[in-house]
Amino acid sequence: MKIYGLIAEFNSAAALLDAAKKVRDAGYRKWDVFTPFPIHGMEKVMGYKNSLVGWFAFAGGAFMFLNVVGLIWFANAFDYPLIVGGKPMFSAPMTFVPAYIMLIMGGAIGALVGMFATNQLPRWHHPLFKNPRFSLATRDKFFIVIGANDPKFSEMETRKLLEEIGGAQIEIVEDND
């Protein structure tokens, strides 16, 4: 079996935040925390930046908006020009409502696609689910997992670091994939 990483348990949010700072300062890059509620400041400690999902939503909305405007122009001014009451072949105000509706739809679809892409979904089973104590992450325990795919990962050294920063119940997580 392949090793997914090491998991360590903490009893409080403050202890986890302090431990996360020490893991970051030790130079690890492939690690994550699991908590029963959001911890203020954890995203800064972990080095998270703005998500790319907003750019996916923007691209999807812009794509749909421009396609609808282009389709209306093509149909009315080029493919089937029909003069009705002396009105122009193409009018921007006329295209706004359907183009705006499709902008909203494209933005929603882009956000969904972006969320799936950036979260690496769908993943039907995660190796952490096999750990019996991991279910406590939804109740009252806090966990740090350092991945075996981290360039600095060494089972002995990583375990030693987790012990030094106050981690309890340090266990190896195995991956069947």
Image (cartoon, rainbow, N blue to C red):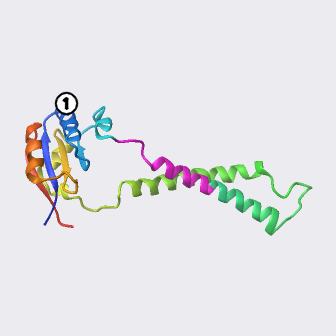
Residue holding disc 1: 14
| Position of the C terminus by quadrant | bottom left
Per the picture, the main secondary structure of the magenta-coloured stretch is helix
| Extreme-right residue of the structure | 86
Classify residue 66 as left or right of residue 23. Answer: right
> Is residue 51 found inside the magenta-colored segment of the image?
yes
Residue 47 place in picture, x, y as percent: 32, 40
Please name whichever residue, 164 or 115, is drawn nearer the observer in this view of the structure: 164
How many numbered marks does the figure carry?
Answer: 1
> Is residue 116 found inside the magenta-colored segment of the image?
no
Tell me where the magenta segment starts and ends, as one range: 48-64
As displayed, is residue 13 above or below residue 93? above
Q: In terms of image quadrants, where is residue 162?
A: top left
Residue 28 place in picture, x, y as percent: 22, 46
| Position of the N terminus by quadrant | bottom left
Q: In terms of image quadrants, where is residue 126?
A: bottom left
In percent of the image, x 66 and y 59: which residue is there? Answer: 67
Classify residue 85 as left or right of residue 144. Answer: right
- Which amino acid type corresponds to the residue marked 1 in the rendered image? Ala
Please name whichever residue, 97 or 19, is drawn nearer the observer in this view of the structure: 19
Q: Is disc 1 placed on a helix, strand or loop?
A: helix
Q: Residues within 10 Å of mark 1 (few under 14, many from 20)?
A: few
Classify residue 85 as left or right of residue 45. Answer: right
In percent of the image, x 46 and y 57: which residue is there? Answer: 113
In percent of the image, x 55 and y 53: which residue is there? Answer: 59
In percent of the image, x 19 and y 48: which residue is there? Answer: 145
